[in-house]
Image (cartoon, helix red, strand yellow):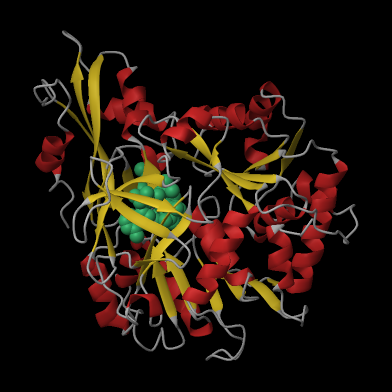
Amino acid sequence: MTQNNLFAALRAAFPSDLSSVAVQTDDGLEYSWHDLDRATAMMANLLASLDLPEGSRVAVQVEKSVEALILYLATLRAGYVFLPLNTAYQSAEIEYFIGNAEPAVVVCSGANFGWVNKIAFKAGTQHVFTLNEDRSGSLLDRAALQSDRHTPVQRRADDLAAILYTSGTTGRSKGAMLTHGNMLSNALTLKDYWGWTATGGPTGQGDVLIHALPIFHVHGLFVAIHGALINGSKMIWMAKFDPKRAIGFMGQATVFMGVPTLYVRMLAEPSLTPAAVRNMRLFVAGSAPLLIETFTEWQQRTGHTIVERYGMSETAMLTSNPYAADKRYAKQSERRGGTVGFPLPGIDLRVQGDDGKKLPVGEIGAIQVKGPNVFKGYWRMPEKTAEEFTPDGFFKTGDVGKVDERGYVTIVGRSKDLIISGGYNVYPAEIEGYINDMKGVAESAVIGVPHPDFGEVGVAVITLKPGASVQPESVLAELKAKLANFKIPKRCFVVPELPRNTMGKVQKNLLRDQHKGLFAS
Ligand code: MCA
Ligand code: AMP
């Protein structure tokens, strides 16, 4: 069998000088390529020593650290399936993910061990380890006893490498199953498309990435980490994004990736000048729409044009504005603000009308995609998986858009009821479910409205049962006790009734219109 383990491909791209720096943290620590190799071997040996069944899931909810990165790579190396969880998730959310995924191993922070351990025990998990930001915890204690030699486990391209939970219209999270082949194909495509180099450049060491995003979603975990590692590039590792510090690192780096909020926050810093970004080669934005104002202001302030790209948990990256001339599109090299660029090489993208037929150039419809990057399906949900694919094998993204005569793709909206806030997805149906269960509430509608920092934020509009008295603040406080903080609507309004169409469906567009100016900057 050919070795298709993603880790093996990343390891093969390590530079020949293993003593050079692979990761430099924002608090001054340095990890060499040799350190990454040894530490992932030790952790992979620890996982191997647990005698886990084939295909076991390793669920991880820990703060961002290089050790957390090592745990991800070690899970790949050992041939198991990585399941990252947002650190903001609270117990009810974690209980659902662990109950649904039934991981064999759970890794959490020492501070959360008490409640996470109970949830894991209930789900039949045999091993719960801790890993803290300060490089302590039982995971590292146990890994330290292992050998630092390990041969990556043989994996086929079609074998699972990770499960990322993401929701559809129902608000119930589904685990998107990504394979070693999905991720390697995407990493290799982007390496080429974004012109990564392993040598030379202003720093003399090829590209250097500022890693500023969380590592529990596609953007930070796959696009950024795989991008750097498959090129043997050093990462400057920020445990938490800070605009001033990120700009400060730009003198030593060449590539930055961020959600639009990060760009908005850096633009508010006077230190963002052409001199500060003189060594930078590439700025990538995605995960949420980049406002044309942000795109233009960035160009004016720095002289650099952001490369906006578009992707999903189910597919990794799908399209990108060109870095260099794209031969397939009449050598177009223009990065067009407001568009997400061209389908990446090897990815088929089409826009379909309501009648299921492909629409002509410029017409708006449902975006569907096909390619080696498209996931294997939703974890233990064969019917849901089948529903999301067309008979000829295209995945229905739930995004609505168009392709122009030059081939540029523009996303104009979403058919799924989803709010993207600061790059995090918030599913109105999930929040509405919680609000509707509250005492005195008759019904609710959660809508997304424009916000100068987060792009979009949630607002709850609720009606009450006859005679009930409920304060909007108490609704938000009750939600805060149960859900991840970024999901909490920023405002709540009590109204006599929700607007409905003749079919009785709540007209969220009217509510969005009514509240669109709430956070006008
Ligand atoms: C924090 N808060 C938020 C958000 N983040 N509210 C709405 N939306 C958010 N995204 C609120 C908290 O609830 C809290 O409110 C207050 O802000 C401070 O929280 P803190 O955690 O300190 O915030 P922060 O550090 O300033 O975080 C903002 C952030 C972060 C850096 C923009 O949200 C972030 O890292 N976003 C990136 C997400 C990402 O990586 N997405 C990629 C998904 P209170 O005090 O009231 O509790 S991958 C993807 O989408 C696809 C596949 C793709 O194409 O890439
Ligand atoms: P996720 O559920 O985290 O996988 O988020 C995927 C969704 O993020 C996509 O279906 C899009 O709706 C959205 N998205 C990602 N990148 C962009 C972008 N550049 N512009 C607009 N929307 C985007």
Q: Quadrant of residue 81?
A: top right
| Residue 59, image x, y percentages | 65, 40
- Relative depth, front residue between 237 and 295: 295
Indicate left or right for 293 with 117 as reference: left
- Above-or-below relation of 192 to 452: below
Residue 500 placed where, x, y %?
A: 12, 25
Count of numbered badges drawn on the protein: 0
User: 276 left or right of 476?
Assistant: right
Q: Quadrant of residue 230?
A: bottom right
Residue 225 visible in image: no
Q: Residue at x 79, y 35 (%)?
A: 53
> Residue at (39%, 36%) from the top-left corner?
168
Question: 340 left or right of 49?
Answer: left
In the image, 185 versus 311, the foreground residue is 185
Above or below 493: residue 403: below
At x 47%, y 34%, the residue is 386
Query: Relative to the observer, which residue lies in front, 423 or 5?
Result: 5
